[in-house]
Image (spheres, helix red, strand yellow):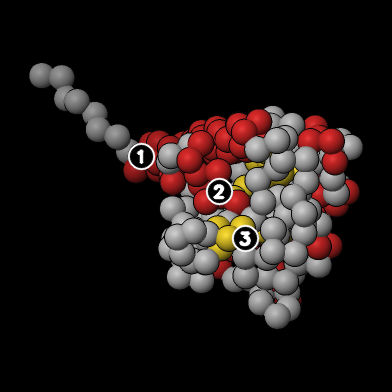
Amino acid sequence: MKVKRGFTLIELLVVIAIIAILAAILFPVFARAREKARQTSCLSNTKQIGFACMQYVQDYDEKYPPGLVGADPAEQGPVSQSSYFTTYKLTADTIYPYVMNVQIFRCPSSSSTSGYSGNYGFNRRLCVDARSASVLGLSDVQRPAETVMCLDAGPYMGDESYLTSPTGSFWYYPGTAGGRDPASLSPYPLTGWSAGDFVNGRHNGGVNIAFADGHSKWIAGSTLLGNPGWFIP
């Protein structure tokens, strides 16, 4: 009778080592692939937001949608859903009738539970605070293809100061740390997920941006950090 030989201990250890090596190689690849899918979903969100803004522009004499415009009746906005904003609407609330979907204002890669406008912030130099500034029109923007309108971030309104002088909490843009320590931001240091988002960016080192002409694309955090002028109409 022929006796079947089992695996030796050495052979088992070799197999286990090979599996461990393959797992170490493949798991990061799978993680990047999953994030790429979320990045694409987020980019679709910014495209829909950009398209909604362009529809608003066509309906309102070529004026960009403002932020903090008076709300009548006074109630929480459909997107912001915040008791802090009942007498005023945020930009996301203003363009909501053109999308009728709150979910597009939620980034699939963000774990932030902040209210206001979800996970997308509008450039307050373009979508101005209507309480203190006149709304801008298409003719006021010199470089619409290079002017940020909305981006994958935390703040409901922001400008270039969030690049040059971030103060933590949700007053920052993903992937734009530029060597700055998130824990040292003042008066609101960043910790946990937000700290990693500030340093690495939530989408493979970058951020999705909708520009003033309505188009959207992924931009590396380092590129955005080096172009604060993109927030100036």
Report whether 1 appears left or right of 182: left
Structural crowding at the residue carrying mark 1, measured as other residues with C-alpha within 10 Å and reported as few (<14), some (14–19) or many (≥20) = few
Residue type at mark 2 is Thr
* Up/down of 158 relative to 214, above or below: below
Q: Can you say which quadrant of the picture contains the C terminus?
A: top right
Report whether 211 appears left or right of 75: right
Mark number, residue 12: 1
Q: Is disc 1 placed on a helix, strand or loop?
A: helix
Q: CA distance from mark 1 to mark 2?
A: 63 Å
* Residue 205 drawn at (x, y percent): 68, 46
Does residue 217 show up? Answer: no
Which residue, given by chain and number where applicable, does mark 2 sit on? 94
Residue nearest the observer in this picture, 123 or 40: 123
Residue nearest the observer in this picture, 50 or 19: 50
Q: CA distance from mark 3 to mark 1?
A: 66 Å
* Residue 149 drawn at (x, y percent): 71, 44
Report whether 39 appears left or right of 7: right
Residue at 73% x, 55% y is 128
Residue type at mark 3 is Leu
Q: Earlier in the sequence, mark 3 or mark 1?
A: 1
Which residue, given by chain and number where applicable, does mark 3 sit on? 68
Residue nearest the observer in this picture, 8 or 161: 161
Do tag 3 and tag 2 residues touch (Cβ < 8 Å)? Answer: no
Report whether 27 appears left or right of 222: left
Q: Earlier in the sequence, mark 3 or mark 2?
A: 3
Q: CA distance from mark 3 to mark 2?
A: 9 Å
* Residue 162 drawn at (x, y percent): 76, 61
